[in-house]
Image (cartoon, coloured by chain):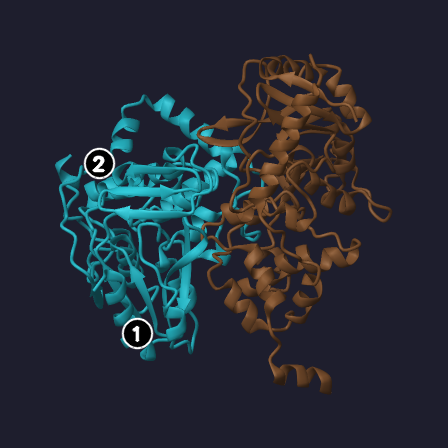
C-alpha cells in the first residue's frame, strides 16, 4: 500500500487543522510528566515519549456525567415530588494523536465489552464512533514492554486509523482506515519515497529486535484456572502488593467503573468513574460481606481477568496489550509477566493432583 | 565483610525466631528493586542492599501484625527514615514493638529514579548500575554514563538527619556520620517565597493531574486506615468519586492533615506517584509547623507521645498567654 510522508515542521499545522472542529488529545509535558492533554494551537506536542496515562481516556474518561437530575416539589402538595432527568450524551468529535500501537489496540478490548451484540453502552459507543486514533510506532523498546508476547508489535496498526512511523525528519504515514485517510487529507503530506519506507521498515525491525523473544502465554488461561483455589500461591504473589490502583488506572485495557449519584440539595448528577479491582471496596457488598477480602484474592482476579477469563470469552484474546505501564508505575515493581509465568511454570503438588482425581 | 554479608548473617541467625524478614531483591530490570519477604534461608540468598532499595518496608507492618490472635514476629531491614516509621507506629500503638525486629544500617541516601532517568537521557536499555563512592556508573549496550550520586539522590535525603537506623535491634556496617543539613528543605524555602496566589495556582495545576490511584496513600507507612479510608468510603460519603481538581485537592488535604505530626518524611508518597506530583512539599510544610509549635520530630523517640495524640492545658512550647 502506498505510504505518505510528513515532515516535523508540518506536523504542527496538521494538528492545528485537526483541532479546528475536533477535540484533539496529544501527549504533552504536563509539569514534568508526559500525559494526554487537549491540544490547542500554540501548545507543544511530545510525540517521542510514551504517555504515563493510557489513550483510553479519549473514549472512556475517568469521570463522566451520565445524567443530571432535579427534584421539584409540588407547591400544592409537598409530599409529591417530581424528578426531571436529563441525559448527557457526548457528541464531540475527537482525535487521539500520539498514542502507541499497544494503547490503540488496547481500545479493542473495551469495544468487545461496551459495544457488542448483547450490550451497547450508548455513552461509550457515541464517543468511540466520534474518536479516531493517530498512533506513533515505537522506535525503541523499554524493559517493561511486551506487546510482542500478547500478539502485537511496535508497528501494529490494529485499532488505529493512522499509523505514523518516525523516520529522519518526519513520519511515514499509513492511512489504516477510510476515516484515517480523510485525516491525512487535512495535512500537508507528500508521497513517501522508497528510501523513507525502507527506513521506516528498519526502525521497526530494530525495535522488534530490542523486544527479544516473545513469551508464549497460550496455556496461561488453563494454568491460571488450575491455580484458582491455591491461595498459598496467590498470597505469595501478592505479598508485596500495596493495593493501590496505579496499575489499573494507567492500564489501556482496564474498563471497570463505579456509578455514584452526587446530589447537592434538590439536584445532582449521576457519575461514572473508573474503578479499580485492587481496592477492598470494589467487591464490598451492602451486607458487609466481601468475596475478595484480601489483596491475594484481588490480584488473582486482575491476572485471571486479563489472562484467563477474558480470553475464554473472546476467542483466546488476551486482555492485556503489553504496554508495561502497570509494571513501570507500580510503586513496588510488581511484574504482571512474572505472576502469570509463575502460574504457567507451577508444578502441581502430587497430593493436590490426587485430591482432584478423587473428587 | 561487606555490609550486605553482615546483614545476611544477622538475618540468618535471627530467622528461626521470626515468621519473616522483609528486605529487597532485584526487580524486573537493573534499576528496579522490589520488596522481598524472606521466610527461608534460600530466600535470603536473593537479598540485595544498594541505593536503589527505595521502598519503606514499614508500610507492610500494620497489615502483617494486625488481628486478634496474631502473634507473628516480623523482622525488617530499615534505613534511618524507615526506622522512624516503625518508631512512630509503635508510639501510636499501631504495632507492638516486641513483635518487630529491626535490622538497621547506615544509609547514604537513595536514588530518585526520576532524576536518574533525566540524567541518563539517551542511555537506553541500562543493563547494570554500579555505585562507586560518590559516583554512579550506568552501563547500557552501547553507552556508559557516569553521574555524581548527589545529582540523582532523592530529594528527601537532602535534609535527612537520620542516616542511621534509630532503635535498631541489629546494625550492619559502620555508622554514617551525620553532616550539617539545612533546617528547611530548599524546595520549600523557594516555594514559600512565592505569593499566595501563585502557590495556590501551582497546587491547582498539580491537583488537576492527580489520578486518584491512592499510590501515595498506600505506600505511606502512616496511612493505616487502608480499606476504611474516608476518601473512598461510601458510607459516610465524604468525597465524591469525581476526579476533578477540587475533589483531588480535598483528598490530598485530608491526606496531609492526617499525617501532620506523624509524617516521618520517608518520601514514599512522592516516589510512588505515577504522575510525579511533588507531595513532599506539603508534608515538609506541615512538619515545619509541628516542629515550630510543639518542638517535636516524629518517629525519633520511642517513649515520646506525638503532640496531636495528647492534650495539655498549657502547651510547653506555645506561649498562649504571652500574646
Asked whether residue B274 is in view, the answer is yes
User: According to the rendering, which colour does chain B have?
Assistant: cyan
| Residue shown at 54% from the left, 52% from the top | B233
Q: For residue A205, what is the image quadrant? A: top right
Q: How many labels were placed on the picture?
A: 2
Dot 1 corresponds to which residue? B12
Dot 2 corresponds to which residue? B184
Marks 2 and 1 belong to one chain: yes
Q: Quadrant of the C terminus of chain A?
A: bottom right
Kindly state the secondary structure of the residue where label 1 is placed. helix
Kindly state the secondary structure of the residue where label 2 is placed. loop
Apparent side of residue A111 relative to residue A235 in the rendered image (left or right) = right
Query: Could you say which is closer to the camera, residue A39 or residue B149?
Result: B149
Query: Could you say which is closer to the camera, residue A77 or residue A235?
Result: A235
User: According to the rendering, which colour does chain A have?
Assistant: brown
Mark 1, residues whose alpha carbon is within 10 Å: few (<14), some, or many (≥20)? Answer: some
- For disc 2, the chain is B
Q: CA distance from mark 2 to mark 1?
A: 40 Å
| Residue shown at 68% from the left, 42% from the top | A106
Amino acid at each position: 500500500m502506498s505510504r505518505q510522508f510528513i515532515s516535523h515542521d508540518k506536523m504542527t499545522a496538521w494538528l492545528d487543522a485537526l483541532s479546528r472542529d475536533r477535540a484533539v488529545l496529544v501527549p504533552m509535558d504536563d509539569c514534568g510528566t508526559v500525559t494526554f492533554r487537549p491540544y490547542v494551537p500554540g501548545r507543544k506536542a511530545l510525540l517521542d515519549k510514551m504517555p504515563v496515562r493510557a489513550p483510553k481516556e479519549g473514549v472512556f474518561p475517568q469521570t463522566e456525567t451520565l445524567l443530571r437530575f432535579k427534584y421539584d416539589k409540588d407547591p400544592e402538595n409537598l409530599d409529591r415530588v417530581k424528578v426531571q432527568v436529563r441525559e448527557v450524551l457526548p457528541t464531540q468529535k475527537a482525535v487521539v494523536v500520539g498514542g502507541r500501537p499497544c494503547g490503540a489496540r488496547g481500545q479493542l478490548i473495551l469495544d468487545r465489552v461496551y459495544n457488542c451484540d448483547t450490550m451497547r453502552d450508548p455513552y461509550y459507543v457515541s464517543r468511540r464512533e466520534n474518536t479516531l486514533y493517530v498512533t506513533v510506532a515505537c522506535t525503541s523498546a523499554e524493559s517493561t514492554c511486551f506487546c510482542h508476547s500478547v500478539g502485537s508489535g511496535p508497528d501494529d496498526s490494529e485499532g488505529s486509523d493512522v499509523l505514523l512511523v518516525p523516520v529522519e525528519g518526519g513520519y511515514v504515514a499509513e492511512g489504516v482506515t477510510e476515516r484515517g485517510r480523510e485525516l491525512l487529507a487535512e495535512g500537508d503530506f507528500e508521497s513517501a519515497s522508497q528510501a523513507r519506507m525502507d527506513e521506516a521498515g528498519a526502525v521497526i525491525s530494530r525495535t522488534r529486535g530490542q523486544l527479544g523473544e516473545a513469551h508464549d502465554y497460550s496455556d496461561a488461561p488453563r494454568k491460571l484456572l488450575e491455580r484458582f483455589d491455591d491461595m498459598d500461591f496467590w498470597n505469595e504473589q501478592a505479598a508485596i502488593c500495596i493495593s493501590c490502583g496505579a496499575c489499573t488506572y494507567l492500564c489501556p485495557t482496564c474498563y471497570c467503573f463505579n456509578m455514584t449519584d452526587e446530589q447537592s440539595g434538590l439536584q445532582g448528577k449521576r457519575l461514572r468513574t473508573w474503578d479499580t479491582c485492587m481496592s477492598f471496596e470494589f467487591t464490598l457488598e451492602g451486607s458487609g460481606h466481601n468475596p475478595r477480602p484480601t489483596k491475594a484474592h484481588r490480584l488473582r482476579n486482575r491476572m485471571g481477568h486479563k489472562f484467563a477469563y477474558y480470553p475464554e470469552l473472546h476467542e483466546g484474546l488476551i486482555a492485556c496489550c503489553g504496554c508495561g505501564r502497570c509494571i513501570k508505575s507500580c510503586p513496588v515493581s510488581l511484574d504482571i509477566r512474572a505472576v502469570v509465568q509463575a502460574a504457567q511454570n507451577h508444578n502441581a503438588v502430587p497430593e493436590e493432583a490426587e485430591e482432584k482425581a478423587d473428587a | 565483610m561487606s555490609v550486605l554479608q553482615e546483614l545476611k548473617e544477622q538475618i540468618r541467625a535471627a530467622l528461626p525466631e521470626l515468621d519473616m524478614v522483609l528486605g529487597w531483591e532485584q526487580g524486573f530490570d537493573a534499576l528496579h528493586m522490589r520488596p522481598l519477604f524472606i521466610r527461608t534461608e534460600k530466600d535470603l540468598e536473593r537479598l540485595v542492599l544498594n541505593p536503589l532499595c527505595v521502598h519503606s518496608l514499614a508500610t507492610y507492618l500494620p497489615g502483617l501484625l494486625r488481628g486478634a490472635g496474631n502473634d507473628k514476629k516480623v523482622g525488617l531491614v530499615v534505613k534511618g527514615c524507615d526506622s522512624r516509621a516503625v518508631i512512630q507506629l509503635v508510639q501510636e500503638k499501631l504495632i507492638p514493638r516486641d513483635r518487630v525486629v529491626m535490622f538497621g544500617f547506615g544509609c547514604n541516601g537513595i536514588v530518585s529514579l526520576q532524576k536518574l532517568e533525566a540524567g541518563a537521557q539517551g542511555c537506553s536499555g541500562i543493563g547494570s548500575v554500579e555505585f562507586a563512592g560518590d559516583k554512579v556508573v550506568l552501563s547500557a549496550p552501547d553507552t556508559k554514563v557516569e553521574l555524581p550520586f548527589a545529582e540523582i539522590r532523592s530529594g528527601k535525603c537532602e535534609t535527612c538527619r537520620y542516616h542511621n537506623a534509630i532503635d535498631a535491634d541489629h546494625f550492619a556496617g559502620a555508622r554514617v556520620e551525620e553532616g550539617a543539613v539545612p533546617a528547611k528543605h530548599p524546595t520549600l524555602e523557594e516555594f514559600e517565597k512565592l505569593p499566595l496566589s501563585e502557590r495556590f495556582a501551582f497546587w491547582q495545576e498539580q491537583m488537576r493531574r492527580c489520578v486518584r490511584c491512592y499510590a501515595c496513600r498506600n505506600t505511606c507507612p502512616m496511612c493505616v486506615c487502608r480499606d476504611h479510608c474516608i476518601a473512598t468510603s461510601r458510607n459516610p460519603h465524604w468525597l465524591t468519586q469525581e476526579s476533578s481538581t477540587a475533589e483531588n485537592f480535598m483528598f490530598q488535604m485530608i491526606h496531609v492533615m492526617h499525617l501532620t505530626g506523624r509524617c516521618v518524611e520517608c518520601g514514599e508518597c512522592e516516589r510512588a506517584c505515577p504522575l510525579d506530583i511533588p507531595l513532599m512539599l506539603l508534608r515538609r510544610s506541615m512538619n515545619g509547623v509541628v516542629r515550630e509549635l510543639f518542638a517535636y520530630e516524629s518517629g525519633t523517640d520511642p517513649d515520646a507521645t506525638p503532640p496531636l495524640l495528647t492534650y495539655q492545658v498549657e502547651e510547653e512550647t506555645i506561649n498562649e498567654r504571652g500574646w
